[in-house]
Image: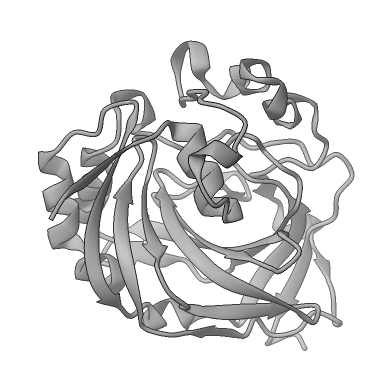
Amino acid sequence: MLLMAPQIFFVFALTLLLGVASATDVLGAVEFAYSGKNGPDKWGSLDPAFAACSSGNKQSPINIQKNQTVHNKLLKPLIRNYKPANSTLVNNGFNIGVRFDEYAGEVTIDGKTYSLRQMHWHLPSEHHINGEQFAAELHLVHRAADNSVAVVALLYQEEDADPVISKIMNGLNNLAKEKCKADEVAEIPLGTLDIKPLKRSSRKYYRYAGSLTTPPCSENVTWSILGKVRSISKEQIAALEASVNSNCKKNARPCQRLNGRKVELYDELIG
C-alpha cells in the first residue's frame, strides 16, 4: 500500500533525523536540492535556520585521509544491538529511507546510548576515503535523549547485491511506480525488517565530530564511518535512484573542510 503525505523536503528530513513530533514543530517549508538554484552551495542562504550550512566549521561530509588519521587506543568497539522492527519505506523526494516505527536497537558511544531511528541512502557516497568516492553510502541515524545524533555510515562499491536492500526491493519497485511530488512523501509499510547483517564488519572505523549532511546542517553529530566497504548491485543502485526527484538523483553533498578537526581511528588489529 502506498501512502502519500503532504510535506516538504526539509520538514521530513528534520522530523526523521531529530525526532520532531510533527511538521508544525519545524521552522518552515523550505525546499533544497543537490543541483540548480537550491543546490548545496546555496543551502546556507535558503533560510536563516540553514546558516550553519555555509558558516559552520564542523560540517559533514569530509574526505578522510588515512595517513592523517589519529589512532586512538581509548576508542571502544562499535557495539550495535539491532533488533527486527516494524518499519516503513519512505521516499521524501531527495532520498530513500527506512523509518523504524518501534524500538529497533541502539548504539553506545562514550557511555551514551543512542536509539536507532531511521536509515537512508546517498548515491554516490558523501564521505570519501583518500579522495575516492564510492557508489553509495548508508546512514544509520541514532538519537540520544539529549537530541544529539550519532550516525554510523557504511560505504558501498558496485558489485554483488546487498542483502538488506534485497529485502526491500519489492517496496522500492512500488515506489518507482509513483513519482513523489515536491510537496509529498510516499510511504510503503514494510512490516518487520531485520537489519542484523548491517552489524557485521565493525573491526575498523573512523570517528569525528560533524554535522547533518542536509539542511539545517546542525553540528551535533558524532560520525562513525566503517572501514569495511560493502557491496551493492547495479540494479539496487537503479532502484534507489528511480523514485527521487530529478535534481536529487545524485544526492551527495560535496566534502567539507576539516577546519582543524581530527579524525580518529579505531582498528581492532592494531589494538
Query: x%, y% of residue 214?
Result: 57, 38
Where residue 53 sits, quadrant-wise, is top right
Which residue appears at 55% of the width and 35% of the height? 253
Q: As drawn, is 49 to the left or to the right of 178?
A: right
Towards the viewer: 231 or 194: 194
Towards the viewer: 235 or 171: 171
Going by the picture, which residue comes out furthest to the top?
37
Going by the picture, which residue comes out furthest to the right?
260
Where residue 185 sits, quadrant-wise, is top left
Please state, as top left, top right, bottom left or bottom right, where the N terminus lies in the image: bottom left
Query: x%, y% of residue 251?
Result: 43, 36
* Res. 208 visible in picture: yes
Query: x%, y% of residue 149?
Result: 67, 59
Going by the picture, which residue comes out furthest to the front?
24
Which residue appears at 39% of the width and 44% of the height? 123
Q: Is residue 215 above or below residue 18?
A: above
Towards the viewer: 59 or 136: 59
Q: As drawn, is 8 to the left or to the right of 152?
A: left
